[in-house]
Amino acid sequence: MASLLDIIIPKEKKFFELLQKQVAILQDCALKFNQQIQSKHTSLKDFEKLDEYIDKENLKSDKLVQEINISIHDTFITPIDRDEIQNLTMLLDAAINSIQELTAKLTYISFSTFDSNFLQGSQLLYDCIINIKEIFNNPIHFKTNKVNIDNIRKMIRQAGKTSHKSMRKVFSTENAVEIIKSREIYETLGETFKKINNIINSFEIILINHS
């Protein structure tokens, strides 16, 4: 039941809708990236097109960040603290930026051959973001979101293990160029998972503060 204060001065609900739009962009970028990685027939031109596509989606995210920041200053009461909203939108934007950076690096270093560990890492990244979407679709359900957050953390740990396996394999070779390329790509993939981890850490604090 709504409190008397909520009835007299209702809280603005649109912030979650804007954040959900941003999550949808993140999901779309991760989906397109994973589809390209999992494809058996991929080329440099394919990654160039993907980079252009994600760049456009990144601009959409930037506009949402701007809209959210402007709306925060124009709204008397927000559903959660202003700093929490700003932090979430910036973290989501950072994750989208990281996927774009990963795609750009695959393009300019002409990296198009992926082992099973990288394929698994790409799939885990997409699966993490699917869970993030579920969290933002039901932001007030503590128990459900706690399960999603735990699932994401498990997938992030799994991705770290697969990345280490690949790097051990790469360093066992004598090809210095391939070592440099692989390290660059796996480090950027790892940074992307860190961005995902930052999102769920921030959301978990919000859940605890408002439960």
Image: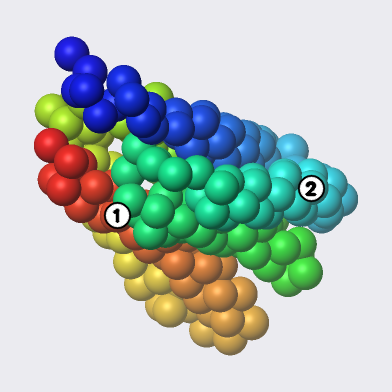
- Where does the image place residue 116, in percent across and percent down from the top left? 46, 47
Give residue 202's mark: 1
Q: Nearer the viewer, mark 1 or mark 2?
A: 1
The colour scheme is: rainbow
Q: Residue furthest top?
A: 1
Front residue of 122/31: it is: 31
Front residue of 95/12: it is: 12
Vertical position of residue 101 compared to residue 134: above or below: below
Does residue 207 appear in this view? yes
Give residue 56's mark: 2
Give amino acid for label 1: Ser
The N terminus, quarter of image? top left
Vertical position of residue 154 compared to residue 138: above or below: below
**Residue 10 shown left or right of residue 107 in the figure:** left
**Residue 152 shown left or right of residue 30 in the figure:** left
- Where does the image place residue 133, in percent across and percent down from the top left? 42, 31
Q: Residue, x 33% and y 66% (percent of image)?
A: 164
Give amino acid for label 2: Lys
Give residue 146's mark: none
How far apart, in angstroms, are the residues tagged by discs 1 and 2? Answer: 26 Å
